[in-house]
Amino acid sequence: MKAPKIKQSSEAIILGLVSGLIGVYILIQWKWEKDADILIYLSVSIGLLSTLSSKVANLISTGWMYLGQALGKVTGGILLSIVFFLFLTPISKLQKVFSGKGKFTNNSSSQTNWHDRQHTFIKEDLEELW
């Protein structure tokens, strides 16, 4: 996997990570009333370690970006597969059932859908294509 291009400073990434962990902790406490003190300990330790050492902050931010890049590749494929199999495949099957012959069926006696067009292209054919 290529090294991710980091556009933000490592301090901004660490701040977002710590804020996200605290936000998840608050959500868990408020919504499910579960004990999730490990998130507070994790966020405090990440914040303290990155404050004390810039090398640790760079290491944590680079690791976080690698994780984000890997999750982006995995979830992109999963989401596209779900859309394909849950939406596009049933729609195509229903179209095939209800439409009878499709647009591309050959209604004539010829063996192909290609039509020979005897046309010499001129300059005006290529102007304003759309």
Image (cartoon, rainbow, N blue to C red):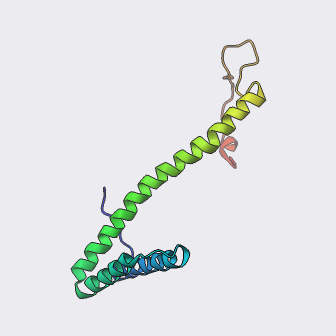
Is 90 above or below relative to 61? above
- Residue 106 position, x and y percent, is 72, 19
Q: Nearer the viewer, residue 24 or 108?
A: 24
Q: Nearer the viewer, residue 117 or 27?
A: 27
18 displayed left or right of 91: left
- Residue 51 position, x and y percent, is 28, 87
Write down the quadrant of residue 109 in the picture.
Answer: top right
The residue most toward the top is 109
Q: Nearer the viewer, residue 126 or 98?
A: 98
Residue at figure coordinates x 28%, y 79% from the top left: 57
Q: Nearer the viewer, residue 35 or 123?
A: 35
The quarter of the picture where the N terminus appears is bottom left
- Residue 130 position, x and y percent, is 70, 49
Q: What number of labels is visible?
A: 0
- Residue 33 position, x and y percent, is 51, 76
92 displayed left or right of 58: right
Is 30 above or below relative to 90? below
Write down the quadrant of residue 114 in the picture.
Answer: top right
Residue at figure coordinates x 37%, y 58% from the top left: 70
